[in-house]
Amino acid sequence: MISLSDVRVARENIVQVVNTTPILQSAQLSNICGNRVFLKAEHLQKTGAFKIRGAANKVKQVVEKGATFVTAASSGNHGQAVAYIANMLGIRATIVVPDDVIQSKLAAIQAYHGGIEKCGLTSSERLPRAEQLASEEGGVVVPPYDDPLIIAGQGTIGLELLDQLDEIDIVVVPIGGGGLISGILTAIKEIKPSVKIIGVEPEIANDTYMSLQNGAITSIPPTGTIADGLRATQPGSLTFPIVQHYVDDIVLVSEEQIKYAMRFVLERTKQLIEPSSAVTVAAAIYDKIGARQKNIVCVISGGNVDLSQLAKLV
Ligand SMILES: *Cc1c(COP(=O)(O)O)cnc(C)c1O
């Protein structure tokens, strides 16, 4: 397991590259939740999601070790983050995307000068291709969550929160492969263990919830949840032990609840957040957290939405 000092080192490593994102508040959101709700606005992060934190920490080390090429298997926020940071640090990146990737995602990767390689329709085809490309050219694969430097980078959100807010009772965090929550758990539980940390998954992508119940990594069948950043079918082998050790609870939200939360945030706060982030707001609105008059931070993990899908989502 990584420790607090790894997260502190990550923060020094990435401070020049990432934004310290603001904390937003909405009286209407607080009212309907019956708690003081704060939004940690990682949708205003560079590349539109928190993934740049872990990717920057990892790619920086790759560069220090002398490699000049990285790959990643992701058409989503992780792929964009790796393309962005590689370009910024002056090395090449190739992002392996599915054959049916949507145009807006391709355009984002290309805007950061990332190379594109199309391969198959499932992640089980893309990852071996990313590994093959990396090994052919002496490069390094940047994994999306199951890597100590990635986890430590995501954990810098936890350090920022403790600096930004004097009183936090509960932090609510989305769970995909678990890199984000395990980093935040490491940072906050090692500094201020009284803060509760609650993970959220879609009902139809409840792999970490099931794993926690079963006391062992448990996989679920592929899922089509609208929260496309949370479609991992099992938690990581590095992330799950951290979740198991520290997390206070994991709660589940329905697809309809995710859409309602996304719409509520857009309409009332004028912030466009993506479904993977809206799960935390949904958990607060639909009283999954079981708290009253507490200071609750919902981590808004990203804001990348394909605008052609927007009407369908809200
Ligand atoms: C990747 C991602 C998540 C999930 O993060 P994990 O580290 O995989 O748990 C949540 N929200 C957004 C917007 C993401 O891109």
Image (cartoon, rainbow, N blue to C red):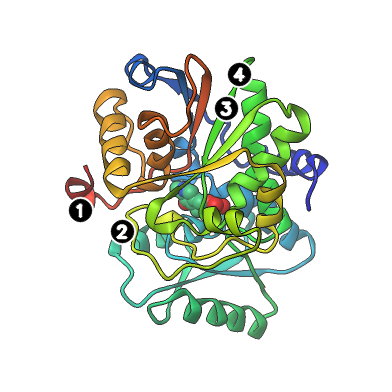
Type of amino acid at the residue the image marks with label 1 = Ser
Q: Secondary structure at mark 3?
A: strand
Q: Nearer the viewer, mark 3 or mark 1?
A: 3
Q: Is the C-beta separation of discs 3 and 2 under 8 Å?
A: no
Is 266 left or right of 299, judged from the image as shown? left
Q: Nearer the viewer, mark 3 or mark 2?
A: 3
Q: Which residue is mark 4?
A: 165
x and y percent of residue 223 in the render? 38, 65
Disc number placed over residue 308 in the picture, else none: 1
Disc number placed over residue 104 in the picture, else none: 2
Q: Secondary structure at mark 4?
A: loop
| N-term-proximal mark, 3 vs 4 | 4
Q: Which residue is mark 3?
A: 170
x and y percent of residue 104 in the render? 31, 58
Q: Nearer the viewer, mark 4 or mark 2?
A: 4
Q: Is the C-beta separation of discs 1 and 2 under 8 Å?
A: yes
Disc number placed over residue 153 in the picture, else none: none
Compute the Cα span from label 1 to label 2: 9 Å
Type of amino acid at the residue the image marks with label 2 = Ser
Type of amino acid at the residue the image marks with label 4 = Leu
- Taking the spot 50% from the left edge, 42% from the top edge, the residue there is 46
Residue in front for this viewpoint, 90 or 251: 251
